Image: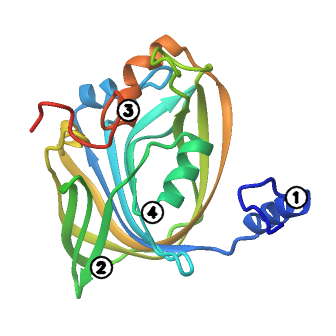
């Protein structure tokens, strides 16, 4: 009988897949990162317990083209600064990805709020434009001009906070207790330039980052970096406290389709 590809894989095949994934070379991306101060009440409002707002209400948009061999990827993130048990980090609200491969692994393994979307990073001479778009709306656009090189930073560590959960089969709550994940990223940078420009936030009912207004642009850069990451479950969280925030993960809270709710058009 010919091999049935949906059938069980052998122990050797499973071990080989794990070994290969553990030996990936550095994968470099070219991306734009914009950092701005926003409204402190707005930043606090989007943070599920036990995350707390920091002293400085920062928002970070990262928009990158990733050089996966034979599989180029557009990857983005819009995150707010947050604190958990004294540890400062970032809580991503939306992470557009251009391919399902990146989306599925991030959501199922780490609990990342990834969604299929459009990611663009364009440079013509000194002019730069980068954007995140979904449903035909470029809800974040960063534009400007390169005005000088920056010194390369030392390798750095960044922590992102994710909530990993499964909505209940009957539509009420969760099938199991949700957990908080600390995802630690080790970043190396090999090129970095400063951009003078601005951040444009456009209204979108699906990705309402316009609710986090740009009060003051802190920094915009373009550069090349490589990152590895590891995640740790730090504990369960209060399901009732998290429940009012799970709509952040979905375009339609009924989870029926990835399109406009009935009567919206």
Q: Secondary structure at mark 3?
A: loop
**Circle nearer the N terminus (2, 1):** 1
Point 50% across, 25% down: residue: 167
**Circle nearer the N terminus (2, 3):** 2
Q: CA distance from mark 2 to mark 1?
A: 54 Å
Nearer to us of marks 2 and 1 is 1
Q: Secondary structure at mark 2?
A: strand
Q: Position of residue 256 (x, y in %)?
A: 35, 34
**Circle nearer the N terminus (3, 1):** 1
> What residue would you read off at disc 3?
255
> What residue would you read off at disc 4?
99
Q: Position of residue 113 (x, y in %)?
A: 45, 42
Q: CA distance from mark 4 to mark 3?
A: 20 Å
Point 72% across, 62% down: residue: 5
The crowding category of the residue bearing disc 2, from other C-alpha atoms within 10 Å (few below 14, some 14 to 19, many at least 20), is few
The residue positioned farthest toward the front in the image shown: 1
Name the residue nearer the viewer: 176 or 223. 176
Query: Is 230 situated above or below 10?
Result: above
2 and 1 marks in contact (CB < 8 Å): no
């Amino acid at each position: 009988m010919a091999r049935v590809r949906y059938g069980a894989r052998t122990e050797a095949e499973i071990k080989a897949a794990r070994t290969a994934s553990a030996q990936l070379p550095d994968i470099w991306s070219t991306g734009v990162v914009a950092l701005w101060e926003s409204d402190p009440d707005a930043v606090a409002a989007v943070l599920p317990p036990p995350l707390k707002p920091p002293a400085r209400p920062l928002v970070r948009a990262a928009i990158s083209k990733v050089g996966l061999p034979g599989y180029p990827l557009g990857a983005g993130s819009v995150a707010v600064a947050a604190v958990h048990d004294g540890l400062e980090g970032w809580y991503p609200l939306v992470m557009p990805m251009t391919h399902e491969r990146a989306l599925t692994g991030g959501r199922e393994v780490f609990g990342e709020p990834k969604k299929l979307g459009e990611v663009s990073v364009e440079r013509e001479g000194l002019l730069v434009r980068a954007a995140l778009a979904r449903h035909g709306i470029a809800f974040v656009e960063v534009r400007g001009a390169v005005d000088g090189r920056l010194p390369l930073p030392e390798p750095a560590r960044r922590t992102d906070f994710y909530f990993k959960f499964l909505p209940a089969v009957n539509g009420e709550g969760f099938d199991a207790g949700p957990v908080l994940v600390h995802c630690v990223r080790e970043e190396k940078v090999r090129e970095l330039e400063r951009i003078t420009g601005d951040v444009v936030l456009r209204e979108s009912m699906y990705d309402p980052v316009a609710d986090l207004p740009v009060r003051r642009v802190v920094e915009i850069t373009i550069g090349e970096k490589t990152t590895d990451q590891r995640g740790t479950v730090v504990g369960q969280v209060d399901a009732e406290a998290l429940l009012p925030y799970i709509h952040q993960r979905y375009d339609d809270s009924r989870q029926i389709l990835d399109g406009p709710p009935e009567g919206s058009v």
